[in-house]
Amino acid sequence: MEVIRLISRAVGGILGIYFTSDMDVMSDEAKKIFSNDEDRKKYIDAVEKLKNPENKEEPITLSTGEKITLVS
Amino acid sequence: MESQITITTIIIIVWLIFPGIVFKRFYYKGQFAKQFGADLFADRLISSIFWGIIVQIITFLIYSRSFGFTFTGIRNKTSAVYASVLANQMPTISYSDLEYILGYLAFLIIIAFCLGSFIHFTVRYFKIDLKYPVFRFANHWNYYFRGEIVSMREFKSLNKGRWLSTTVDVVIDDGSEKNKMISGFLTQHTISHKTGDLESIYLTSATRYSHTDKKFIPIPGDCLVIPFDKVIDLNLRYTFQVINDDQKKQILFRKLLAFCLIAGLLFATIFPWYLKINIFLKIGGVIFGCLTWLLFIIVSLNPLDPRPTARFPTKDLFVLFFAMVFSLSVTLLLLNITPF
């Protein structure tokens, strides 16, 4: 049973590269960010700052420790 | 004369138009589903017949290879049925003939579904619709809202990285003296079934411009629905993520993975149909062949994944390796490819 679960997880993971939704108007990464309150706040603040034409880039550090740089 | 017309009409509908309709139903899906019934009746009829013919050819090639019948064989049987009808007699159709006909019909629908889905997937995955306008779907809003326009030649200069989200600034006419300006993250949109025009947009984390405070203030609530007929102006702002070297490696790795996978899966799906074995063994061979290839790709490429969190522990890789060997053995046995 454990083996079948492992195989289905591995196969599902690898086939996932083909089956990402092409319909959502928000990317999977943004959805992940929005699902965490802390990250959501950081993201919204960064997008707000990018409204100013002087700010070309806006780096943020997510709660997972991942650093991403936003541009608009 | 009337019965001839009726029979011909039924044959055309069942064998040509219906598979074409199934094909189109699965080609126009997702945000493009409303294009399925949007054209003129004549256009829809002609395109359904066209795709119906393509589906028929593919189905016939596969089905005739699997069951070993020829065009002449079918023609002889159909001529016998036609001769009986002309002689005002009940045509003689055996139970096995009926099985073949119904099996063919079922296979026709399956092929139409698979082909429609596969072509839709290919056009979207390889961005063919963005590069070549002839392949573009009618719902152009989807391209604008998903930031896909940056892949089009006309908007190439906007491409700054990986698209994350779209922020919308709208000026709406709510009937009051001053128009309202609303801003928020675009989360969903709906399209009119009849006209294909934008019906509503759904915003989250929405703010509105306050004339008294001279700034944007948050709108209480979770999701703001704006009917598009109230919108005067619409401004889209895309937020992109800058791609660094690590992410470039990840993208390259995923592309390599996708290419290896599709090449192997296509081979595993097509090859068994050239073997002279029972159809059930062919289907089993296709299923286990695809599974073997998937497990082979996982076992060989997963340790090279640039994301450490995506890598399997060595113990799990061993389990997957033995599962791959088992699956390969079953495939070879089913396809009757044994060294002895």
Image (cartoon, coloured by chain):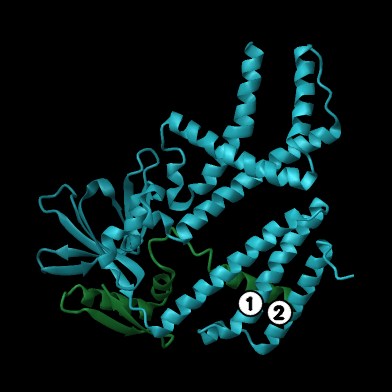
Chain colours: A green, B cyan
Residue A35: image location, x then y, percent: 42, 73
Where does the image place residue B245, in percent across and percent down from the top left?
A: 39, 84
- Taking the spot 63% from the left edge, 31% from the top edge, the residue there is B14
Q: Determine if residue B152 is in view.
A: yes
- Residue type, label 1: Ile
Residue at 79%, 17% in the rendered image: B84
Viewer-nearest residue: B36 or B182: B36
Nearer to me, B16 or B207? B16
Q: Residue at x 38, y 53 (%)?
A: B132
Q: Are marks 1 and 2 in contact (CB under 8 Å)?
A: yes
Q: Amino acid at mark 2?
A: Leu
* Lower sequence index among marks 1 and 2: 1
Residue B302 is drawn in which quadrant? bottom right
Q: Is residue B66 left or right of residue B166?
A: right
Can see residue A1?
A: no
In x, y percent, where is residue B192?
36, 43
> Which corner quadrant of the image does residue B101 belong to?
top right
* The N terminus of chain B, quarter of image: top right
The answer to whether A43 appears left or right of B68 in the picture is left
Image point 20% across, 68% down: which residue? B217
Label 1, on which residue?
B298
The label on residue B320 is 2
Circle 2 packing at 10 Å, graded few (<14), some (14-19), many (20+), is: many
